[in-house]
Amino acid sequence: MIQAIGLTSNPRKELPPAVDDVSFEARPGCVTALLGAPGAGKTTTLRLMLELQRGRGITYFRGRPLHRIAHPSREVGVLLSEVPGHPARTIRGQLGMVCAAVGVPIRRVDEVIEVVGLVSLCDERLGTLSRGMDRRLGLACALLSDPHALVLDDPAGGLSVTEGRWLHGILRAHAAHGGTVLFSTDDPKEAARTADRVITLEGGRLVADQEAADFARTRLRPRVAVRSPHAARLGDLLAKEARAAQRSVEVVREDGNRLSVYGSTCADIGETAFRHGILVHQLADETGDMGPHATLPAEGLASATVVTSALLTSTSATSTSTDDADAPMDDASMEDVSTEDASTEDAPTTDEPVTAVAATGAHTPDEPGPTAESRTRAAASPGARDLPQLPPPIAVRQALSPLRPLRYELRRATGVGTGYLTAITVLVSSALLSVLLARIGHTPQPRLLAAWPRDCPLPPAALGAGLLGALAFGEEFRHPALAADRGTVPRRLGLLAAKLLVASVTALALAVLTVGCDLEMLYLVYGRDLAGVPADWLSLSASWIGLTVGCAWAGVLAAGIFRSTTAGLAAVLAVPVVVVPLVQKTLAGPSVRKAAGFSERLRELLLMQWPFGGARYIAAGARLVAQPVGGALMLSLTALLCAYLLTTLRSRVR
């Protein structure tokens, strides 16, 4: 069960809150519709329930607020907008990422794909999906962790009739298995047709909470749609017969040759047309809206005119008619009549006749309007009297880190072709650049193998590793699969460690492949003279690997801090362009002390000898850091890591 109590959004400047003191229940085994016109506060209500927006109130999901649930995705399946996946990722790849994020086995993907009918499209890319297929994918993501409750914002919006019928069938099946379904819509007929209970919002307030049958009776009314080339004549005849029979019938002429007849049936209208020899092209039963914002269709609103209103039944045998009965009422008059009828529901009855006007938007005493319904519900609700004067504040719930961060990151990195394309570009450009440098000459052998000209700040391999590292977080913020409803991703250490590990392995592979390709190209073009291995290859390899891995880490950390791939790549380029000159200028000054005997003092730190010659490797690492490029890279990584940790702690404190 979902229990929303006192949901109120924070007002902006001098505007009233979008949602004001909304309380309702969505029961298990039932489909509940949240109905309201655009701007009524439906989406804001759902976001307050899911703790995605600041405000006041509390929502219980089976007795617990969402921030008290260890794994919210296994309790509530959410579909608030389109699936924000990478356009080049396949449906199966997207669902595999979500599986790793919510901690369910990968076999669940095939089960959900079969349920939502995407078996034949599982290898299609997200950028090619239609609106209906995207909704199916969003529903698959919501069902992936087998949640008890489903919360969906306008799930059938923009879908065809067939797609909408299928989607509501899935929701009905979920409710039939004991689940709770809550969806929003602005179509009253859809709500009455597909839901068990309808909750109506108007202007951010709850105006009705009804069973679907009561909603259809009090907020909707049947009408007959008629199309005829002699619509005006037929309308006059229907009004004349209704007046003669003292029946309440309203005939509304819409655009062209269409009539909407309220208070009559297809049989009666057909018989009238047959008796007078009037040709009829269409005669069908429809359901018209009688809600707070009921209007005619946009295409027929300008030319719609009320042909006549016939009326005049009373509770006694005596009928009373007035001169104003046949005149159409304006919106203010209809609102006054509705309010007056609602306020006199409980008044004692008298023997005086009662005249009812059948007009669009008017409510009769046995069909209370939204104002009376909301007052009755508010007075009868046991939770309304127990609400505190000031509901508890709603803090924005932080997105959780994926339960399988390493598996998630591997599927994210290998699910699109960006990484492969970047690696191929780096290898080709590095091989061509090494051949060009060898032809020009005056380039040392280590720089030749790395394809690193003296005038370039970084070699292609280091730039490629930094770009791949920046994409690790940049794509998360651009296509937030982890937190689709927030537009951001969690800054958690588990996710950071997984991204750094994958970026390190990628940079290491790129560094080795680059040197191997350059060496092979130099051998093929110039022979063995330039294809030799330097004598100090071990230290050079350590420096080379450290450079590429460090650039990858800088890209990951900077993109995670500034939430942008461009910022991550800019931070990688800032190391040789800005930080290295500063370090060189600092080290170029006079030095009074030197670090002579550093390796001997390292051995004295422990009572025993370093195993496997560890002191030698530490001394070599210290020499790398002492170089300007190594020192600048280490300094940059330390600053970025501290900034990332600071932002993480700051978000947790807030």
Image: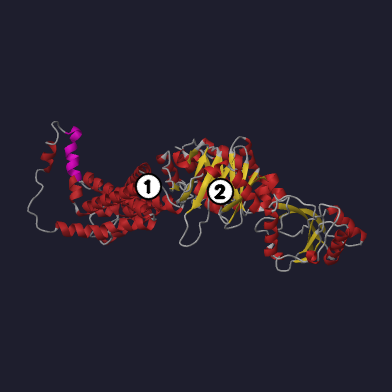
- Left or right? Give the position of 30 relative to 426: right
Of tags 1 and 2, the one toward the viewer is 1
- Residue at position x 51%, y 49% in the image: 7
Question: Quick check: is 299 in the magenta stretch?
Answer: no
How far apart marks 1 and 2 lie (CA) works out to: 31 Å
Could you tell whether 587 is left or right of 327 in the image? left
Can you tell which mark lies on residue 491? 1
Viewer-side residue, 431 vs 298: 298
SS of the residue under disc 1: loop
Q: Label 2, secondary structure: give it.
A: loop
What is the magenta range? 610-621
Q: Amino acid at mark 1?
A: Arg
Neighbour class for label 2 at 10 Å: few (<14), some, many (≥20)? Answer: some
**Residues at circles 1 and 2 in contact by the CB criterion of under 8 Å:** no
> Going 14% across and 36% down the picture, which residue do you hit?
605
Residue of label 2 = 124
First in residue order: circle 1 vs circle 2: 2
Q: Is residue 620 magenta?
A: yes
